[in-house]
Image (cartoon, grey):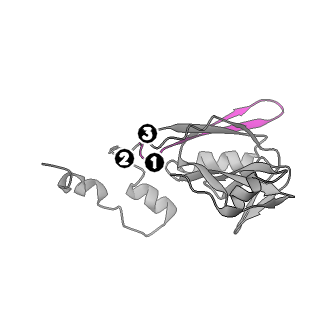
Amino acid sequence: MQTFSTAFLNALNADHFEYAFLVDLPVGQHYTNHGYDLTVGTSTYLSNGLLVKFANIDQTQELNLATYSLELSNVTNTLAKAYAAGNYRGLSAVIKLAVLVDGVIQGDPVILYKGTLDSFSVRENGRSSNLTIKLTSHWASFNQMSGRYSSDRLQQDLYAGDRFFKYAHDEMSNIGWGKK
């Protein structure tokens, strides 16, 4: 169930308000489609015209494997190379909605979609590069054995020296819960 802060609800009842999408992506990227940069907590959401296209968000109370895609326009080579060089599949990505009155965010932004990075593609032409990012539910690969998000290799990429997932694949067959 979705809950809203009192300040958020009051803003919706105001004579005038505006809204902005806030996107948290892996590699420490934070973007907004608003006319200027927005700061929420310690995160600054860049408003440089990059965030250009959103898919429709389908909210439901049922457990499902919904996917969501968004497009960033005129991305720098640095950002495109960062996604291409690392394995960010499975890392958290969040899309939120903020309501503003007189340029000030009211209450806490509401989470519209929370999932993981599934895939991305870069389209280039002579003038610009577009990065399309596909997000998916974190349940999408729950039973996946090969290439799981919780592999030792990915853990080492993220947290060198942390051996938490070193034997994860060996122990998978010994888990007894859920069996009769």
**Main secondary structure found in the magenta portion:** strand
Which residue appears at 39% of the width and 45% of the height? 147
Which residue is at the front of the view, 12 or 141? Answer: 12
Which residue appears at 24% of the width and 53% of the height? 172
Residue 40 % position (x, y):
72, 64
Q: Label 3, secondary structure: give it.
A: loop
Residue 171 % position (x, y):
23, 57
Mark 3 and mark 1: Cα distance apart in space: 10 Å
Circle 1 sits on which residue? Answer: 138
Which residue appears at 75% of the width and 37% of the height? 129
Which residue is at the front of the view, 10 or 152? Answer: 10
Q: Which residues are magenta?
A: 121-140
Q: Label 1, secondary structure: give it.
A: loop
Which residue is at the front of the view, 16 or 111? Answer: 16
Circle 3 sits on which residue? Answer: 64
**Disc assigned to residue 142:** 2
State yes or no: discs 1 and 2 in contact (Cβ < 8 Å).
Answer: yes
Q: Label 2, secondary structure: give it.
A: loop
The answer to whether 106 appears left or right of 90 in the picture is right
Indicate the quadrant where residue 106 lies.
Answer: bottom right
Mark 1 and mark 2: Cα distance apart in space: 7 Å
Indicate the quadrant where residue 53 lies.
Answer: top right
> Nearer the N terminus, badge 2 or badge 3?
3
Indicate the quadrant where residue 3 lies.
Answer: bottom right
Inspect the magenta stretch and tell me whether residue 126 lies in it: yes
**Circle 1 residues within 10 Å: few <14, some 14–19, many ≥20:** many
**In this view, 85 is above or below 129:** below
